[in-house]
Amino acid sequence: MAPKNRITPEEALSYHLNPVPGKYEINASKPMATQRDLSLAYSPGVAVPVEAIAERPETAYDYTTKGNMVAVVSNGTAILGLGNLGALASKPVMEGKAVLFKRFADVNAIDIELDTEDPDEIIKAVSLMGPTFGGINLEDIKAPECFIIEQRLKEIMDIPVFHDDQHGTAVICAAGLINALELTGKKLEDCRIVLNGAGAAGIACLELLKTMGARHDNCIMCDTKGVIYQGRTEGMNQWKSAHAARTEARTLEDAMRGADVFLGVSAKGAVTPAMVEAMAPNPVIFAMANPDPEITPEEAQAVRPDAIVATGRSDYPNQVNNVLGFPYLFRGALDIHARAINDEMKIACAHALARLAREDVPDEVAMAYGRKLSFGRDYIIPTPFDPRLIYVIPPAVARAGMNTGVARRPIIDMAAYELSLKSRMDPTASILQGIHARARAAQARMIFAEGDDPRVLRAAVAYQRAGLGKALVVGREQDVHEKLTAEGLADAVREIEVVNAANTRHLGDYKDFLYARLQRKGFDRHDVHRLAARDRHVFSALMLAHGHGDGLVTGATRKSAHVLQLINHVFDASAADGAVGITAVLHRGRIVLIGDTLVHEWPEEEDLADIAERGVAVARGLGLEPRVAFLSFSTFGYPVSERATKMHRAPRVLDARGVDFEYDGEMTVDVALNAEQMSHYPFCRLSGPANVLVVPARHSASISVKLMQEMAGATVIGPILTGVDKPVQICSTVSTVNDILNMAVIAACRLGSAR
Ligand SMILES: NC(=O)C1=CN([C@@H]2O[C@H](COP(=O)(O)OP(=O)(O)OC[C@H]3O[C@@H](n4cnc5c(N)ncnc54)[C@H](OP(=O)(O)O)[C@@H]3O)[C@@H](O)[C@H]2O)C=CC1
Ligand SMILES: CC(=O)C(=O)O
Ligand SMILES: [Mg+2]
């Protein structure tokens, strides 16, 4: 179970540097295009909400961002497990937390790094920020100052103040432990628990577990000085004293002998295999230090195969990390305009998380995660990308808040609230996550045909290093070596496999195969040799056809029509063979598939029906419920035009085929995508806006996609080549490294191919 998703320091820096420094930006949520917009947004219009808020402060939740805005505040004194590296160095983590708030719970968060270690200064600064925010998330502030700061801010502020490292960690740890103990058949009140790390996270974890039933006498807490026992004086404070145990144990090693549970919120490598070996049967080990755990799952399970092991990292099973808590705790709290996040809300969150992991995992989650998950030793807690979290956890938190009187605006219709949470999240993010996870599970050997292009080489390295599978690069060894070195990736030379006509044993087979296909098309042996040995597109396609790779990505260096012609020497990938190009356009939380963007120049009505069917297969592969619209500049027969006729007839072809998806047409694109416009045609058979758009010709497809890309900044994936036997994907000459990687991912999860 070694982590597959290896990342290098260069990749981490490049991720933070490109395309712009940092991890987020701020966008306006209101139009700001005209003189009128300016008058409304700013002077004079803005005066109206100013006066309304001055008169009734609670309306700030209606007229400003306050109600969905959280401050992530740190002074950098306990950055993950890296220690006190200062306020500025903590900024990447705090920006990261802000992005997680947005990604997982649509909470707007802003990072604030305060350059002081003086609790009073932090208290003063944060309390003065109260009007701006709906909540305060304190992060990576070390103990014991964090206890004083949080306590005081809670007393003086009228919005939730929540120290994530304390309570977020405690909640997730409790949720994981509830389930781990259920699996081992032990009861919390009977367990001997050892906790290492008596700081922010440690104190809060033990406090919550004691509230939930763990017995004080069964719990031993350790820090850098060893066991915190009654009477110890060195390195103590009042928060540690509260957990001092009556025990003869003095070291972590002593404490772990016979323990049922080990909880680590201390530092890398604090636990040895010998300590784990000495634990009770079926031990539970949560090694939660970040980025490196107290002991790795491999090390722990090597000595104790009966152990249930969790870490704080995303590259092992069982990620016990506060990312499962803070986004949803704040979502629930903000939605009731809470004054605080209290113990009841935290416990409700822990139980809701534990329950969710025990539930049957629906296919959409398995699809998003790339493998079937079921409650057990390797799945005791939901995964961070579980799309159910957003609509299961916040309602539980909100309900607990309302029951305990912290809600300023209770939710009346809980069912409607859950529905609104479901539609709140950007579905495109989980689609991308889903295809990456499926590709990772497939572990495909991906052939990158154009090993002389630095973008392709970088994509190949990224493919392999992301744990997606093996990268096979077609090129000359020396050239690949030099180009990788020039890209600063010299160490990748040993990792990827370089293949070419000179170093393969299979060239003879490839040529025979090609000759058999081309001999009656005017090619002689000599032509075939040239194609197979010298053209990398053909050579790569031959590798794929012979099973010497599982997928192929090409087209970054030559026009796609040329590349497709070459591929056609090896595969049946022409319009006549039923090949179709489908492009996914992702923008502002919406995804539409457009076809045919690659193969058919001017499809006739039968072809249009084929294109619809291919689009539907891709939509389903992405987890979408397909709704097809045949697009034109006319809608249901008006205005009449010869050019619209085939779009008008294509649905009838599908009628005759008796297909099992929704389709209709012809219609204009606004009718297809806008429910309000569609409602003017009550007979329209689509139950909602279309997500598969069949366009009249390749040029209109290209124009629409490129217009969206250039004008709106949409993310474009494709064209995805479908209807070909094996996964071949053709990028474009303007593809970025990321685009090429996405095409490899599409090929790896066989979105368009039959086999
Ligand atoms: N998985 C998750 O979700 C989370 C994990 N964490 C991890 O927990 C750890 C602690 O964070 P936090 O509580 O915020 O930090 P703090 O600075 O508040 O506390 C650190 C505590 O760990 C103790 N400690 C440090 N090194 C060792 C060691 N080798 N052996 C025993 N005790 C040690 C310190 O002891 P002393 O008091 O003697 O100095 C102190 O009590 C970090 O690694 C962090 O990444 C934190 C939050 C969430
Ligand atoms: C996860 C987290 O908050 C930490 O390690 O500090
Ligand atoms: Mg933290």
Image: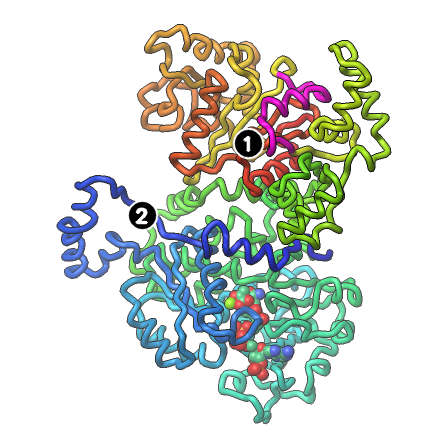
Residue under the image location 54 percent in, 30 percent down: 619
Magenta region, residue range = 554-574
Residue position for label 2 = 28
Q: Is residue 341 left or right of residue 552?
A: left
Q: CA distance from mark 2 to mark 1?
A: 29 Å
Q: Is residue 663 left or right of residue 56?
A: right
Viewer-side residue, 751 vs 519: 519
Residue 700 image label = none
Residue 384 in picture, x, y percent from top left: 55, 53
The answer to whether 368 is drawn above or below residue 261 in the figure is above
Residue 718 image label = 1
Residue 304 visible within the image: yes
Q: Amino acid at mark 2?
A: Ala
Residue 462 in picture, x, y percent from top left: 63, 47
Q: Amino acid at mark 1?
A: Gly
Viewer-side residue, 203 vs 4: 4
